[in-house]
Image (cartoon, rainbow, N blue to C red):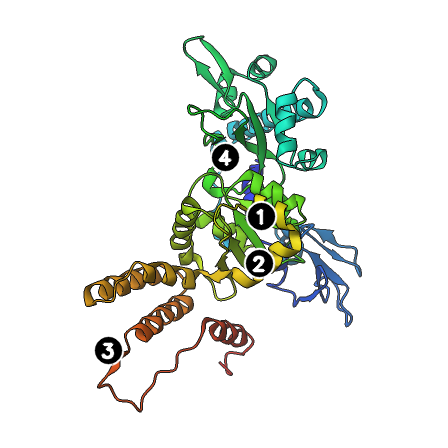
Amino acid sequence: MKYPKEHLDEIKTRLKVSTVVSKSVSLKKRGKEFVGLSPFKTEKTPSFTVNDEKEFYHCFATSEHGNIFDFVMKTQNLKFGEAVKSLANLAGMRPYTFSKQDEEREKNWQEYCSIYNQYVQFYHDEILKNESLTIARDYLKKRNLSKNEVKNFKIGFVERNSNFYEKLKDEFSEKVLVESGLFYLDEKKNKYVERFRDRIIFPINNISGQPIGLGGRTIQENSYSAKYINSPETPFFKKGSNLYNLDLARRLSNKIDHVYLVEGYMDVVGLSKNGIENVVANLGTSLTDRQILILNQFFEDIIICFDGDESGYKAALRAAENSIKELQPEKQISFLFLPDGEDPDSYANKNGKANFIDFTKQAKISIHQFIFNHYKQQTDNNPSSMAIFEKKLRAIAATIKDDFIKKYVLEFFLEKISSLTPHSNVGKKQFYTKKIKSLQSTQRHFNESKLLSGVEA
């Protein structure tokens, strides 16, 4: 029986080709690719290349070529199913267990994909070709979006009286159409209506570029409609496990080591329009562990850049406390706070790419520094307040999964607290001072230790 496509995509999401290949081949970075000696032939001059962006390896000496599944099958002499199990284990996933429901699930997945492909394409064509949609077109012009951005992100518009359900009901069952999340039953009229009617729609793609959900932005400002809505969770769409624009942004990971994580669809589109394409957005929910783990597969530094207002700051604080647990020695999580009243879209439109990049270099701060600064501002200079302050920081550091990072983040916190309370050290032996490594030196030590043999270590 075939493995479901989403299971294979999940493995590819978690594992770069270079990660898999480097388990058996020594690779060196060369431009956008990695090179090494062929695992298929004895050679002295490297002819084997790996391209994470295109998700393949190629051996010029033997013409062997393929993806991570092909590589494991050919180098370990495994069948496809065995390769899938091996890679799932490497990716930290449970082995896939086939059941009687798998065939039905695969059929539902194919139908789900077909529905979304038809839906997205129809309403994308509408906004490009239907000249009567002046309100929607004027809105996009007001947001400084050209036809190029509309095409690149396959943006569409669903009219108020649209009913694509009628176009699909002869091809798909009522159950499958409802489970797509695109329609719901209007009990007063006793008919199915468009969930995204009268909204600009932004397709949310999986890692392979297949639309699996939608974000919708109303163009009519009113008090009874939410400005943004997302598809409800479905069997094939989980908000906490997906990121808007990841399918495009991940292709840049070979040449760019950082990614901007923003709040909204328009922030992604606005930054991309200004030449900053290494950007993704979470989907209207708090940042999840899963989203951080996905981004860590592709980028070294996640720069969280939310709106420069109170709600944006609160969202950033929640993101910091949720994501610090996933810190790793070779990864960074940083925060970028824009001037009050600005969001990434508006700031980039006003100031351009170069200024945005310069501002990032000057203003971004590490996750541990941001957390310390926030709770320091909440603290009064008295014993009770300082005790609460230290207790909170210790609790946050304790959530970090990596023991190396946990140790040095805690020491960072305690050293900073100590500098605020110099009198607490009076009377202690002056000849002993504990040397505390910075997080940067910890990372260097970690990287160097990986190069040592067992005897040397």
SS label for mark 1: helix
Look at the picture and state if 120 lies above or below 206. above
SS label for mark 2: helix
Quickly name the residue at label 1: 347
Find the distance from the CA under tag 3 to the CA under tag 1. Answer: 45 Å
SS label for mark 3: helix
Q: Position of residue 87 (x, y in %)?
A: 55, 52
First in sequence: mark 1 vs mark 2: 1
Q: Position of residue 375 (x, y in %)?
A: 33, 59
| Left-right relation of 89 to 379 | right
SS label for mark 4: loop
Mark 2 residue type: Phe
Location of residue 25 (image quadrant): bottom right
Find the distance from the CA under tag 3 to the CA under tag 4. Answer: 53 Å
Find the distance from the CA under tag 4 to the CA under tag 2. Answer: 35 Å
Quickly name the residue at label 4: 237
- Choose mark 1 or mark 4, whichever is in front: 1
First in sequence: mark 4 vs mark 2: 4
Mark 4 residue type: Phe
Q: Position of residue 433 (x, y in %)?
A: 34, 85
